[in-house]
Amino acid sequence: MSHVDRASDLPIRWRKSSRSQQGSQCVEVGATAEFAAVRDSKNPTGPALLLPPSTFAAMIDSIKAGRFDG
């Protein structure tokens, strides 16, 4: 895993979940063949996490399984 300081500098198209509501706390994701990127939707010029595709897929599977529900 790595990061970039300015997510807006990445040459990717960002997407936010269609389930997100206006004003809610959301993340946006984008991808290339080399990595998946995650950023805060309220700070699109801020940092982004860069994850290998397999790590991103494992994170999504964990979210769907409720492993991060508190």
Image (spheres, rainbow, N blue to C red):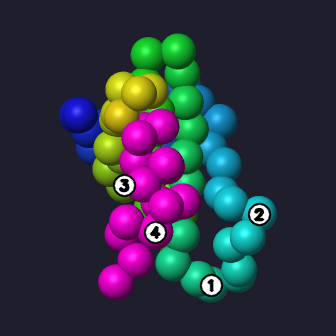
Q: Would you say the residues marked 1 and 3 are in contact, meaning their CB atoms lie under 8 Å apart?
A: no
Horizontal and vertical percent for residue 35? 43, 25
Q: Give the magenta-colored segment's residue range.
A: 56-70
* Sequence-first tag of 1 and 2: 2
Crowd class of label 2 (few under 14; some 14 to 19; many from 20; radius 10 Å):
few
Amino acid of disc 1:
Gly
User: In front: mark 2 or mark 3?
Assistant: 2
Amino acid of disc 3:
Gly
Q: Secondary structure at mark 1?
A: loop
Quadrant of residue 4 within the rendered picture? top left
Crowd class of label 1 (few under 14; some 14 to 19; many from 20; radius 10 Å):
few
User: In front: mark 3 or mark 4?
Assistant: 4
**Mark 3 → mark 4, Cα distance in angstroms:** 28 Å
Residue at 77% x, 63% y: name it.
Answer: 18
Residue 46 image label: 3
Crowd class of label 4 (few under 14; some 14 to 19; many from 20; radius 10 Å):
few
User: In front: mark 2 or mark 4?
Assistant: 4
Check residue 63 for magenta coloring: yes
**Mark 2 → mark 4, Cα distance in angstroms:** 19 Å
Amino acid of disc 2:
Ser
Q: Is residue 8 above or below residue 28?
A: above
Q: Secondary structure at mark 2?
A: loop
Residue 66 image label: 4
**Mark 1 → mark 2, Cα distance in angstroms:** 13 Å
Location of the C terminus (image quadrant): bottom left
Crowd class of label 3 (few under 14; some 14 to 19; many from 20; radius 10 Å):
some
**Mark 2 → mark 3, Cα distance in angstroms:** 22 Å
- The foreground one among 55 and 32 is 55
Q: Is residue 59 above or below residue 20?
A: above
- The residue labelled by disc 1 is 23
